[in-house]
Image (spheres, helix red, strand yellow):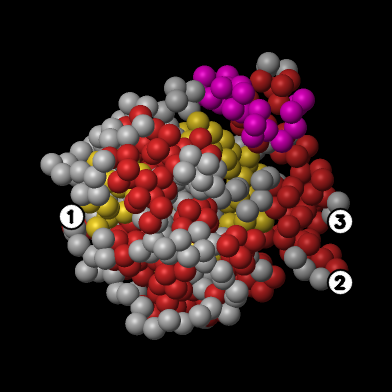
Amino acid sequence: MDNMENSYDKDNMDDIILDNSNMFVTPDGDTTNENINLPKNEEKTGTIIKSIDSGASITADMILKYLLNEGVIVDSDLIGLLGEERHHLTIPGLERALARESRISDISLAKLKGALSGKDYIKSNETKTKILFDKIVSKNLGAIGIESENIKIAMIEDTPAHIEKLSEVLGSNNFEIVFCTISQFKELYSSCYENSKVKDKAKTIDLLEILDECIRNRGSDVHISVGLPPVIRVDGKLTMMDRQILDAEWMRTQVYNLVGKDQFSEIERRHDYDMALPYGTARFRVNIGMDNRGFTIVARKLPTKIPTPIDLNLPEAIQKFTELDRGLVLVTGPTGSGKSTTLASLLAEISIKHQKHIITLEDPIEFTLPRGRSVVNQRQLHASFTSFGNALRQALRQDPDVILVGEMRDLETIRTAVQAAETGHLVFGTLHTYDAASTVARIVSSFPAEEQDQVRAQLGSIVKGIVSQTLLGHRSGTGRVAAYEILVSTPAISNNLRKVDGHLSLRQSIEMGKADGMQTMDIALANLVHRGLVTEEAAREKCVDLENFKKLSKGG
């Protein structure tokens, strides 16, 4: 028996990706197998699977058939999931494959093994171990003694050979067997023979628990993926919560509960969905997607109150954009740079101080604007309109003064936004570009070559300002600070915008436009360093021209 070819040796199990998402915890304290609906037929898969018959009460083939019938895995997954092992499939081999893909939680797998065999499985109150035999026997048999009034053994599988050896070692065949998974066995082995305590991490009941923790920790974002514990971003840094790993079953349930039956089917087809989630006094912008393991959820916490331009310390040049009657103002930057907050602050200021008709086109609506002295209509993609281009054309027929285009994603939307600004409206828009020059180049290059000269001429007339922004961690380690590149329309800027290669001269024009409130990103970053708000190292990571930034940060 000591030379058995198996995979229970703890030292050989380091490649297992532990799925502790439900380790030793059963839903609602359940101690039965009544929630496992066993398959009523013996359907075969289309892929050749040869399960080794060890004479145990449960085999890999039995587990596999159940998972296929329940849709946890599908037939087309089997080759990728099992590879060469499918020709001689064992319970340890199957468990490793399932753990790698986080297809099923540990407790669900242990519970399934119990249900299929007619035996029990490891419970939440059975994490205390007892040395009943030496560790070599434990490794070879995949068996661990559990502290109990009677002799109780947790086993990965109960082959007759293993049972016979246990009876020989214990000097009795009067013992109870409960099933565990390989991952559970590894934890129990450490507890029993290495005196390491089994850490009982908190189980995540639902998505709302994660959102609560994000709010309590003043996080900005939540990242939820199969095979990982929940992750929150605090002050720009990602931190894993001290919780159990999430599995595919849990993720599907949370997405279904969040969006409902009809939208769930649509997400499975399109693999992408955006929504706003009101949450008491908070509000989250949620994106649901998919990766190779299943659904993903990213939720960004939005301010409950729209900050004023003064709250945001917006430079005066940016605040002056609220006084405009017409033209195009673009706020750009990478995802998570605060573009939406800046725009909400400016639009709220317009709504409160001026009598305007404001129409916003968003995906999704992130901030609810105050109506103040204005008429405000906020519209959301898929709820109020089907495409930005069509919605923008419709908005132009509704007597608007100010239009927000949440994202200028395509040629149709960019073209209509340019036309709207050209016909006397004030248009705010966003792009995922990093400075004024790349913003202008992005817009012009969206048009066919034969239209680009005309577009440059239009931009020279309508662009009133471009704000490119980024966020950096505060020097204190708490909070974040925004840096802004600011372009303001002047005769020199307009002239550059009309030239074929004029965007290449924008940086120089911005550097010379200090009197008009303009500044490059490198100047903005150097100012933050001089003011002691951010470290020079953090600023260097965001600068455009490193050598120029070094001179500016030294006062050159």
The quadrant the C terminus occupies is top right
Queried whether the magenta region covers residue 93, the answer comes back as no
Q: Residue at x 30, y 61 (%)?
A: 114
Say how many tags the image has: 3
Does residue 321 appear left or right of residue 220 in this picture?
right
Is any atom of residue 138 visible in this view?
yes
State which region is magenta.
527-548
Q: Above or below — where is 462 with respect to 135?
A: below
Q: Amino acid at mark 2?
A: Glu
Does residue 465 appear left or right of residue 323 in this picture?
right
Q: Amino acid at mark 3?
A: Val
For label 1, count other residues whose C-alpha is less than 10 Å away and answer few (under 14), some (14-19) or many (20+): few
Q: Amino acid at mark 1?
A: Gly
In-front residue for pair 97/56: 56
Quickly name the residue at label 1. Answer: 29
Q: Residue at x 61, y 22 (%)?
A: 536
Query: Label 1 vs label 2: CA separation?
Result: 69 Å
Q: Which mark is residue 500?
A: 3
Quickly name the residue at label 2. Answer: 450
Query: Label 3 vs label 1: CA separation?
Result: 70 Å
Query: Label 3 vs label 2: CA separation?
Result: 13 Å
Does residue 10 appear left or right of residue 253 in this picture?
right
Q: Position of residue 177 (x, y in %)?
A: 27, 52
Q: Position of residue 211 (x, y in %)?
A: 32, 50
Query: Which quadrant of the figure has residue 350?
Result: bottom left
